[in-house]
Image (cartoon, helix red, strand yellow):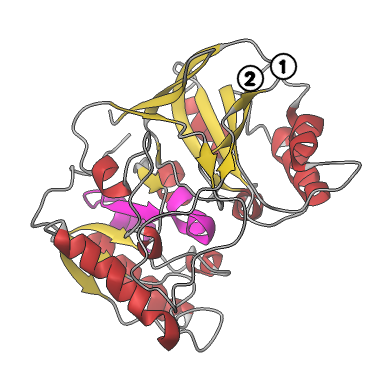
Amino acid sequence: MLFPRALQPGDRIGVTSPSSGVSERLWPRLEAGVASLRERGFEVVVGECMSADRVTSAPKERRAAELMSMLLDPAIRAVVPPWGGELAIDLLDELDWDALAAAEPTWTVGFSDSTAWMLPLTLRLGWATLHGSNLMDTPYVPPEGLLHWVDVASATEPFVQTSPGRFRDAGWDDYAGDPGVSTMTLEGEGSWTLVGGGGLDVTGRLVGGCVEIMTALAGTPYGDVPAFGREHADQGLIVYLEVADYPSYDVARILHGLRYAGWFAEAEAILIGRTRAKGFDDLSQHEAVIDALGMLDVPIVLDVECGHAQPFLPLVNGALARVVVDDRRREITQTLA
C-alpha cells in the first residue's frame, strides 16, 4: 500500500467536483467548509468545475483534467469534493492511470459517488483513500468516539475510533438556512450489531464504499476487489459496504452478485453501514444483507457509522484495521502502514 504523507498545517488542499457541482443557494455552505479548513491552518484552492447547471459540474473531459491536475500537483496534499452526485463513473477512462502510477500519492477524501473514482485509486494503484466526509460535512464537529477526516489524514500513529451510540434518524441540515451549522443532530440511539451475537476480534486490510457505485464497478478493470483480496490474502480483508438509497430487494440482488464475483473470498469480516434506505415488510435492509451474505463463514457487523446517515466514521481504504466487538467495545483501530 502507498500512503500519502500525513497532512500538516500549511499544506494545500484542492476542492473540485468530479461529480455534481454546487448551486448558488448552497455556495455559502461550501465557503463554510473552505473556511473550516483554513482555520485548521491549510491553504485551500477551489477549482473551476463547480457548476450545478447539469447533473455533473462540467463535461467529463474537463472534470477529469482538473482532477488529474490536482492529483499530480505536488503542492496539493489532499483533494476533497463538495459532495458526491451521480455520474463520476464517466471519468474513469479519461484519467491517465500511467501518470498517476508514477506520481506520489495524494490524499483523496469523500464518500457516496466519490467511490467511483476513489476505490479504483486503491485497487489499481495501491493508493490509500479516505472514505468518510465530503467538504460540505467538514465543518461538523465529530461526536465523541469518532475523528474528523483531517485528523485521520494527519495521523502518524495508529488511531482508534469507537461507536458513539447515537445517529441521525432522518433528514439533513438546512445548509441554505444555516450554512455554518457544525453540530450534528443525533437523536437516534443504537450501535453496531454482530450478526449471531458473541464477540469479534479480527484484523485485515480495509476496502469498500457505496453499494450503488460498487456494483457498477464490479467486473470492470476499476473494481477488481477479488484481485486486491488475493494480493493481501496473508492479512485478509475487512470489506465495508454502505447503501445510499437502494431499497432492500435491490441491495439483496447486488450483494448476491458481489458474493458470486468473489468480493468476500478473503474477508475476515464484513461491515455494513447504517442506512435509512427503504426496506420492506418481508425483507428489511438487515435481512437483505443476511439473505445474500449470511451463508458465508464471515462475521457481519451491522449499523456501522460509515454511510449516508450521520455521523461519519472515516475509514481508509488500504489501512490495516482491527475490529473489536464485545460486551464493552465497538471499536476499530486503523494503522496507515
Q: Earlier in the sequence, mark 2 or mark 1?
A: 1
User: Residue furthest toward the front?
Assistant: 187
Disc 1, SS: loop
Q: Position of residue 320 (x, y in %)?
A: 38, 26
Q: Which residue is mark 2?
A: 299
Mark 2: which amino acid?
A: Pro
Q: Which residue is mark 1?
A: 196
Q: Is residue 130 magenta?
A: no
Asked if residue 251 shows in the view, the reply is yes
> Which residue is depicted at the point 69% across and 39% down?
258
Q: For label 1, count other residues whose C-alpha is less than 10 Å away and answer few (under 14), some (14-19) or many (20+).
A: few
Label 2 – label 1 distance at C-alpha: 9 Å
Q: Is residue 106 magenta?
A: yes
> Which residue is depicted at the point 33% across and 54% down?
108
Q: Nearer the viewer, residue 250 or 136?
A: 136
Does 218 sit above or below residue 233?
A: below
> Which residue is depicted at the point 52% across and 27% down?
238
Q: From the viewer's perspective, tell me whether residue 311 is left or right of residue 35.
A: right
Q: From the viewer's perspective, tell me whether residue 199 is left or right of residue 252.
A: left
Q: Which mark is residue 78?
A: none
Q: Position of residue 162 (x, y in %)?
A: 42, 29
Does 324 sit above or below residue 97?
A: above
> Which residue is depicted at the point 63% across and 28% down?
264
Quarter of the image where the N terminus is located: top left
Residues drawn in magenta? 96-119
